[in-house]
Image (cartoon, rainbow, N blue to C red):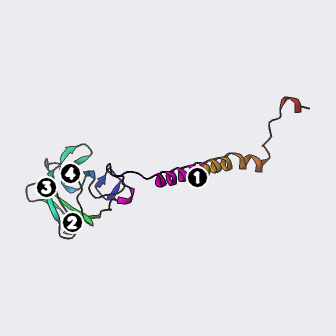
Amino acid sequence: MELTKNIFFNTDKLVENNKVKISYTGKLFQDASCEEVSIHYGFGLNWDNVNDVKMEKTDLGFQAEIELGEGDTFNFCFNDGNGNWDNNNGQNYIFPLEKVHSELLVLEDEPVSLGSAKKLRRSYLWSKKVRLAVYKLITYLPKIISGNYKRKLKNNEIN
């Protein structure tokens, strides 16, 4: 996922309390003399839980894996340890964090009711029926419209 030029994530969404791999190919990577880059990051408007993580230099850019914390946003910038920063021209890089949807989580201590299992089973069966209907439409409708559809005749119905 590319959210901005020169910054890539290994996921489509940034979700609280999940790990994310960041690849950075910005101006500090493009400076051939730069061998070390760290990501300086925090969460929310107040930059809570500030951390610095040294990134690994690869052919694809500087990379690091980060455990996302809680907050509305994931804020970060990059530095090379020599006073050179890439902070998006003083704006910092700020991306929204999505909340974990707790209604989708099943806790180990929490028993699953039969009612919810039946609802899941019913919705699964409906999804299968819909997929089968769509498959039949896609497969047979063009044949019927073009006139190339012929019903297979049984042996005793052959003229």
The part of the image, by quadrant, that contains residue 4 is bottom left
At label 1, which amino acid type do we have? Trp
Q: Residue at x 74, y 46 (%)?
A: 143
Please tell me which residue lies in front, 26 or 72.
72
Q: Verify CB contact (< 8 Å) between mark 3 and mark 1.
A: no
Whether residue 70 sits left or right of residue 12 in the image: it is: left
User: Is residue 22 or residue 90 the one in the foreground?
Assistant: 22
Q: Secondary structure at mark 3?
A: strand
> How far apart, in angstroms, are the residues tagged by discs 3 and 1?
49 Å
Label 3 crowd bin: few (<14), some (14–19), many (20+), radius 10 Å: some
Question: First in sequence: mark 4 or mark 2?
Answer: 4
Range of residues picked out in magenta: 102-128
Labels in figure, total: 4
Are dots 2 and 3 in contact, CB under 8 Å?
A: no
Q: Which mark's residue is nearer the viewer, 3 or 4?
A: 3
Q: Amino acid at mark 2?
A: Asn
Q: Mark 3 vs mark 1: give the one in front.
A: 1
Question: Disc 4 marks which residue?
Answer: 29
Ranked by sequence position, the earlier of labels 3 and 1 is: 3
Disc 1 + disc 4, Cβ < 8 Å: no
Q: Which residue is mark 3?
A: 52
